[in-house]
Image: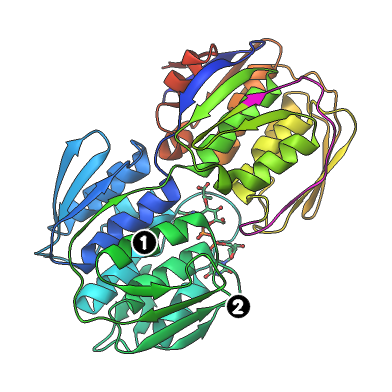
Amino acid sequence: MPRLHIIGGCRLAGTVKISGAKNSAVAVIPAALLTAAPVRLENLPNIHDIQVLVEILRFLGVKTVWENATTLLIDASKIEKTQAPYELVKKLRASYYFMGALLGRLGEADIPVPGGCDLGPRPIDQHIKGLVSLGAQVDVEHGLIKVRADKLVGAHIYLDVVSVGATINIMLAAVRAEGKTVIENAAKEPEIVDVANFLNAMGAKIRGAGTDVIRITGVKELGGANHCVIPDRIEAGTYMIAAAATGGDVAIEDIIPKHLDPIIAKLREMGITVEVGDDRLRVLGNTTPQAVDIKTFPYPGFPTDMQSLVMVLLTQAQGSSIITENVFEGRFKHVDELKRMGARIKVEGRTAIVDGRTQLSGAPVRATDLRAGAAFIIAGLIANGETIISDIHHIYRGYENICGKLTSLGAKIKEVP
Ligand code: EPZ
């Protein structure tokens, strides 16, 4: 299995271009099944999750053509199957979006219970609650979630938990349901707005995406559309933290700065200079940032996906920091590995106390999930000596060409067999 080899001690400098948002792309690709007309998706990130989703589309009998590295044409005029194959589905949790999309298009779907990262329990009860409210029959047997609906009828759905996946999945089924659907306590992530914009371009009637109340009026048919996926705010945040941690000077391009507000605010609170332009920003790191407290929350709070990354930066801060993980239980699996690199971190339940001014030292570590893997890369960049990261398939699921982009910024990182 390939691993990443990193030699620490370099300051990152230069310019990096951000790719399309993974968490939007993994939803708009299944959403394309809601129409029999051709769809063109642009600015898709070239990452493993997207390749798996395209394989699933092809398995279902849907025609797909890559027009170039980031533009995909989808023709779902004919869908031959409504069951996605387990060996593909288990690779990514977002395959649950095929439930809403196939239900909306054909009134049925058989999706294996989703896999994905190891972030502790990741139920989909809110997805099921929403689909059942719209009139679907949901049975789970032999590891398959079987959803059926003779007719989908709009409903008033109140989410018990602010869930990105449930909000999007319900939207996918509701756009062609008869009548009005209201989703209350909806998630407000930019990726949800992006999916809603794509569906509206296809002729859906969605209002309020990005707020906690989304109103949908069902339509009989959806047409084709062109859609350009928004930039990946978590990939951008990753390079911001890498620049700050290495005391570097990095320009990050092709972004929507508004989506990065919580990260920009926290870096500035730490005393790091962030210059913001229209579609780019520049981070000037300093190697002794101030300690700050971080609480992760659904958007527009500080993103849980940035938690492991900012933890690495805080090991270098002046003083001790408190990180509270409010979104996922068990999203501290990266702490043990960071402690093996010399970090001084104490976990108590949902809280981690991070001591600063700690010289990290390179070590062999194993990526447990996508963002933990990215955190180990940043730790490797600032550690003394060499770091070897295994299980890097997690990282390739969500970061396009991370070795190439970091190397162009001066990092000493390469894939080794
Ligand atoms: C999405 O996951 C993202 N993945 C995650 O990014 C991200 O961390 C998460 O949203 C939060 O922002 C994709 O978009 C593909 P949730 P999702 O439903 O939708 C609980 C990454 O690194 N919950 O918003 O699965 C759940 O357990 C990945 O890119 C229920 O209880 O997250 C969690 O505690 C990691 N019941 C909380 O809600 C449900 O039915 C938020 O989960 C659904 C969720």
Residue bearing mark 2:
160
Considering every residue shown, the one lying at the far front of the view is 278
Residue placed at 58% from the left, 21% from the top?
Answer: 250
Residue 7: x and y in percent read 60, 11
| Magenta residue span | 283-300
Characterize the magenta stretch by its predominant secondary structure: loop
Q: Do the numbered discs 2 and 1 sit on residues whose CB atoms are within 8 Å?
A: no
Is residue 263 positioned above or below 157 on the image? Answer: above
Please identify the quadrant where the C terminus is shown: top left
The location of residue 47, given as percent across then percent down, is 36, 37
Image quadrant where residue 203 sits: bottom left
Q: Quadrant of ligand 1?
A: bottom right
> Which residue is label 1 attached to?
197
Q: Indicate if the residue with disc 2 has its beta carbon within 8 Å of ligand 1.
A: yes
Is 391 placed above or below 153 here? above
Q: Is residue 383 left or right of residue 223?
A: right
Q: Amino acid at mark 2?
A: Asp
The image shows residue 388, relative to residue 33, as above or below, that is above
Above or below for 69 versus 180: above
Residue drawn at x 69%, y 46% is 332
Residue shown at the point (43%, 55%) measured from the top left: 93
Query: Nearer the viewer's eye, disc 2 or disc 1?
Result: 1
Q: Is residue 59 magenta?
A: no
Residue 106 visible in the shown view? yes
Confirm or reject: label 1 Cβ below 8 Å from ligand 1. Answer: no
Inspect the magenta stretch and tell me whether residue 289 lies in it.
yes
